[in-house]
Amino acid sequence: MGVVLRNLQNVVSLRRARLRKDVETLRHIFGVQKFDLGIICVDNRKIQRINHIYRKKNQPTDVLSFPFYEVVTAHGICHLLGYRHETEEEWNEMLQKESYILSEFNRLTGRHLEPLTKRCT
């Protein structure tokens, strides 16, 4: 299955070929190669409008409001698979999953990425 990438922002420089390769690596680690995946990069103003329309929250989301790089993709895929961080229990579960995924990603790519999810305070 395929990956569709759209960059609708110009705040963060984005190399599409590199992103596509990294997304494929993350899909392999997550075991979701059989699903199509669409990634749309937008700025904070756009995601805030989308949140306001669809979620009635007039603020940017945590996933798309960060500068776009490989960790954000892992974080976003965790959300797509149903992981949340509304409670401390959910936060810890997502942190554990994201840490595992990134350790595998780092092992396969030689990178040293860390999870976006931080300990719940």
Image (tube, grey):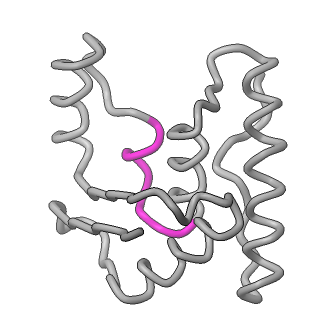
Question: Residue at 58% of width from left, 58% of height from top?
Answer: 32
Question: Residue at 64% of width from left, 49% of height from top?
Answer: 116
Residue 20, percent from left and from top: 42, 79
Of residues 34 and 103, the one nearer the viewer is: 34
Q: Which residues are magenta?
A: 62-70
In the displayed structure, 55 sits above or below 112; it is above
Q: Where the C terminus falls, by quadrant?
A: top right
In the displayed structure, 54 sits above or below 68; it is above
Of residues 76 and 47, the one nearer the viewer is: 76
Would residue 87 appear left or right of 53 to someone viewing this image? right
Residue 16, percent from left and from top: 32, 82
Of residues 119 and 18, the one nearer the viewer is: 18
Based on the picture, tell me whether residue 1 belongs to the magenta stretch.
no
Question: Residue at 36% of width from left, 69% of height from top?
Answer: 3
Would residue 19 appear left or right of 90 to someone viewing this image? left
In the displayed structure, 4 sits above or below 108; it is above
Task: Determine the image quadrant of residue 59.
Answer: top left
Q: Where the N terminus falls, by quadrant?
A: bottom left
Based on the picture, tell me whether residue 64 belongs to the magenta stretch.
yes
The overriding secondary structure of the stretch rendered in magenta is loop
The number of discs equals 0
Residue 95, percent from left and from top: 77, 41
Question: Residue at 38% of width from left, 46% of height from top?
Answer: 64
